[in-house]
Amino acid sequence: MITSKRITDLFGIEKPIIQAGMIWASGWELASAVSNAGGLGIIGSGSMYPEVLKNQIIKCKAATDKPFAVNIPLLYPSIDAHIQTIIDLKVPIVFSSAGNPNTYTATLKSHGIKVVHVVSSTKFALKAQAAGCDAVVAEGFEAGGHNGREETTTMVLIPAVAAALDIPVIAAGGIATGRQMLAAMVLGASAVQIGSRFVASNEASCHINFKNAVVAAPEGSTQLSLKQLTPVRLLKNEFFNKVVAAENAHADKTTLEQLLGRGRAKKGMFEGDLVEGELEIGQVTSLIKTIQPAADIVQEIWLEYNELLTALGK
């Protein structure tokens, strides 16, 4: 049985479509637009200083009266400041990632904040449930950005996690259409989290050069790299070629860290350097052909999902 009610009731949203909190792309403009369209918008705090996050939350609250969330990578250096800002400004929902959910989940929930943790395996999903999370995002290795070392695909991960957990599962990784959303729901998800499709939106804060590269990218244009550091799926460019050359030469972790340097993701995704920048995007980029308003993306996915669901019912 397909049901999205567990997630729509949990978050107080109309549509079980969640926009991922992506660095350099998911600011208040995108988050508020998705929330106003009936989904759940997320501010991606991983690229923000504490004062920037505070301003983003204030602007998002002014732009929507609907629920929205903040994504916090738990390994972020200023994580304590981010947590305090979220509590002080009464953000209703937090999506945590890249760390141990035991660290902050109880604190956030004590302030009435719902907590969702991003996982790449059943093992970590069970840990998130034990930590008291209200739901998990099960993210297959097709996803853009940082990824699981297990390289488990969404098709395998979602049913495994859904069978193991009592809390709701949100599917992520390789989802950009209503058809893919329906497949994820059939596999046991109660909602989908979508990143790459929203990179190609008018409201995404990333550079237009990056957006144009996403919609122009053919099949096979991304690859999971930097597994010695933290695995990340990258769009192939000159920087990616340097990473591959270093890895083929058996470069150690220190050498790869030096190659990555500081600000490489900002250079690519926010400043638009398509040659030397780090361009994080999902495998599904080959299905994304246009840059659209975020509300149109939500509506298009939702309509296709419901049309196919109705057709299958008949």
Image (cartoon, rainbow, N blue to C red):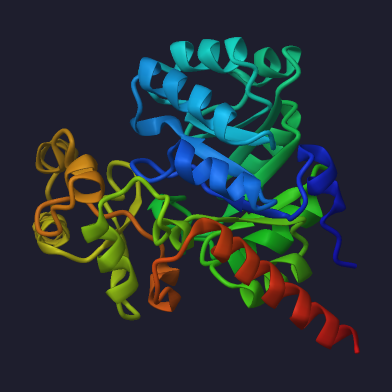
Can you say whether 3 is above or below 86 in the image?
below
Query: Quarter of the image containing the N terminus?
Result: bottom right
Residue 144 location (% of width, % of height) = 41, 56
The percent coordinates of residue 147 (x first, y second) are 43, 50
Q: Is residue 205 left or right of residue 252?
A: right
Relative to 76, is 39 on the left or the right?
Answer: right
Along the viewing direction, whichever of 62 and 48 lies nearer the viewer: 62
Above or below for 30 versus 257: below
x 34%, y 20%: residue: 49
> In the displayed structure, does residue 256 sit left or right of residue 61?
left
Residue for point 13% across, 53% down: 273
In this picture, is 165 found above or below 288?
A: above
Q: Position of residue 35 (x, y in %)?
A: 63, 45
Q: Position of residue 307 (x, y in %)?
A: 76, 80
Question: In this orientation, which residue lies closer to the viewer: 12 or 191?
Answer: 12
Residue 116 occupies which quadrant of the picture? top right
Seen from the viewer's position, the closer of residues 145 and 199 is 199
| Count of numbered badges drawn on the protein | 0
Looking at this view, is 88 or 170 the one in front? 88
Quadrant of res 96? top right
In this view, 276 is above or below 302? above
Q: Quadrant of the C terminus?
A: bottom right
Identified at 68% across, 60% down, the residue is 158
Q: Farthest residue in the front direction?
A: 62
